[in-house]
Image (cartoon, rainbow, N blue to C red):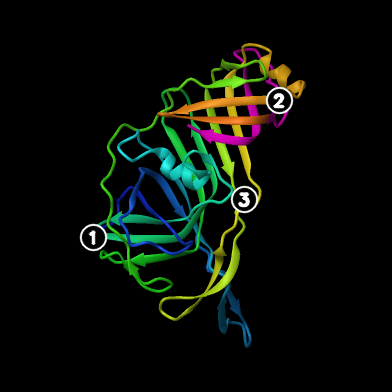
Amino acid sequence: MVQYRKIKQFYYVPEVTYGVTPTSALTYGGPIVSFKPNVDKQVELHRTSGRDFSDVTRGPYKAGFNIKAKARSVSGGYNWTNLWAMFGMGSASGLADTLGSFTAQTSKVGAATTYNFYNGCKVSKLNISSEGPGKEILFDADVIAQWVQAATTTKAITGLQSLTVGADPTDITTPLLIWNGISQINLGGGLTTWTPRKWSLIVDNHLAPNPENRLGADSVKYPLDAGSLPEDSRDIILEVTLPHEAETYLAAKLADTAITAVTIPIDAKTVTLSNGVFMANDLPELKQGLLEETCKMQFTSLSIA
């Protein structure tokens, strides 16, 4: 036996109909840092006679995963926005009320390559972050799926769906995406440069699964937690850490100054956050030594251009 020690990169295929996996070729997503499946069959053991369980029931099947991944610089039709903005925000150019869905593939390489497929994937929460200038940009997503299906080396699946998943794409080899842009903030007097040491942008879509029973391609009945997966309220939160060099942001917090905009360049695109407020008067801690401050802000608008 050969112990698994290698995984392929993250591949996916956009779904036209929620939960239905197309058979077209997969799309390159990016290098995986970590991938943690979340599967809960909601098994209940029933004791109807004696000390030991006699019956087993299963509630609606919960599936999903957390993925931490990197992205690469633009290459042909590849752009970080095609996956992370499109499915985490609703559009490659920013926000949309309805999120698209996709089927995700994970691949382990040992004596042979084996596959798992997650259909009906939607991004419940997306966190884009960087630990500092010149550092890589990390994409961290909590994803809710409808079902997880294992497949052989032929990529053929049966059960809830019956099909052969499309071919793997060619991996992108451009440089890893790093944060090397100049961020700016507008507190009402126009955009001015500021110097975050690190930042984190969260888009929380608060997805709300609707359970339902589904007849599979194999004529078996499947209880699904995410029979459908509508979007509830949305939060757009930016948190930055800066050297404490002036009273600008401390005074803005105390005065409840509105934030007109913040811009964050990522590769060839710029994320613009608009109509924001400071979420807390988190004033800098005073100590003997260099001081820093944290600004946590919430916005109503986000665009990418």
The amino acid type found where label 2 is placed reads: Ala
Image vertical order of residue 270 relative to residue 165, above or below: above
| Residue situated in front as seen by the camera: 196 or 302 | 302
Residue 99 magenta-drawn? no
Of label 1 and label 3, which has the lower sequence position? 1
Disc 1 from disc 2: Cα separation: 57 Å
Rendering quarter of residue 80: top left
Select label 1 or label 3 by which is in front.
3
Of label 3 and label 2, which has the lower sequence position? 3
Residue indicated by mark 3: 206
Disc 3 from disc 2: Cα separation: 25 Å
Residue located at (50% from left, 44% from top): 91
The amino acid type found where label 1 is placed reads: Ala
Residue indicated by mark 2: 258
Residue 293 magenta-drawn? yes
Image vertical order of residue 304 relative to residue 62, above or below: above
Rendering quarter of residue 282: top right
Tell me whether the residue at label 3 lies in contact with that at label 2, contact meaning CB atoms closer than 8 angstroms: no
The amino acid type found where label 3 is placed reads: His
Query: Label for residue 112?
Result: 1
Q: Residues within 10 Å of mark 3 (few under 14, many from 20)?
A: some
Place of residue 226 in the rendered image (x, y in percent of width and height, measured from the top left): 55, 64
| Residue situated in front as seen by the camera: 113 or 171 | 171
